[in-house]
Amino acid sequence: MASKRSLLFIVVTLLIACSQSNFVSTTPSVSTTNIISLKDHLPTLYEEAKRWHPDAYLRNVDIPIQRKQSNLWLISANFQSPSDDHESLAVNLWQDGKLTTEPFKHEASVYQTQPIKNEDWPIDSQDALNLLLDDDGINFLQTHAIHCSALNLERDLAQTSEPVIWILTLSSCGRGDTTHIFLDPITKETGIYTK
């Protein structure tokens, strides 16, 4: 009798485990698999930028939302220097861990903004994506070529105080509407962003 109870317990446990496994597998996973932590990688990106100019500061960041087979960079961080009005630098982190730099020459003087500091964005990239993605956004990423969608960190230059914001861009690569949604990492306010 005890062995029948043990067998029944094992069968019930397996059924529960299988049903939980099925539930987890149907939960959208786009937001947890395709983006990396900016906070973890920013020191390395900064180190590369400081080789370009010791006074380099962070201007903005682009993090493409992509599938693993994509050959896009994982992070592209753009830096400026107050001592150089005619050049900026992109530092790119690739999937194989390689860092590349690309300087950009500017004929006109670049607009020098306030540096983006760590305290300006207490919400890291993954958490920002989770807060910005509603069911419609998750559905969009699951049904479109997502390599044209991205999460950006930048200053909102349209506002007087120029706050640092996260911007989620959902784009179908030019084949339809593009939506920009912002998150203020300090107040956690979200809304549609008009560029």
Image: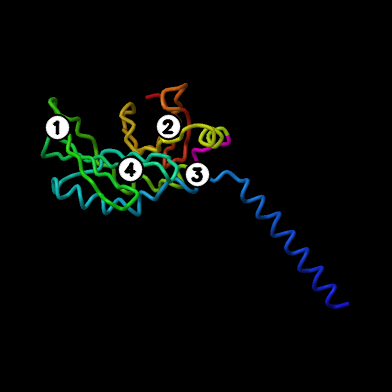
Whole-number angstrom distance, CA of label 4 to CA of label 3: 17 Å
Question: Element at badge 2?
Answer: strand
Whole-number angstrom distance, CA of label 2 to CA of label 3: 14 Å
Question: Element at badge 4?
Answer: loop
Where is mark 2, residue-wise?
Answer: 169
Instruction: Single out the mark in the foreground, 4 or 2.
Output: 4
Which amino acid type corresponds to the residue marked 4 in the rendered image?
Trp
Whole-number angstrom distance, CA of label 1 to CA of label 4: 21 Å
Q: Earlier in the sequence, mark 1 or mark 3?
A: 3
Q: How many numbered marks does the figure carry?
A: 4
* Position above or below: 69 against 40: above
Q: Quadrant of the C terminus?
A: top left
Q: Earlier in the sequence, mark 2 or mark 1?
A: 1
Q: Earlier in the sequence, mark 4 or mark 3?
A: 3
Instruction: Single out the mark in the foreground, 1 or 4.
Output: 4
Span shown in magenta: 130-135
Label 4 CA crowd tier, 10 Å (few <14, some 14–19, many 20+): many
Specify whether residue 125 is painted magenta. Answer: no
| Disc number for residue 31 | 3
Where is mark 1, residue-wise?
Answer: 105
73, 158: nearer the viewer: 73
Where is mark 4, residue-wise?
Answer: 73
Q: Quadrant of the N terminus?
A: bottom right
The spot of residue 187 in percent (x, y) is 44, 40
Which amino acid type corresponds to the residue marked 2 in the rendered image?
Thr
- Asked if residue 164 lies left or right of residue 14, the reply is left
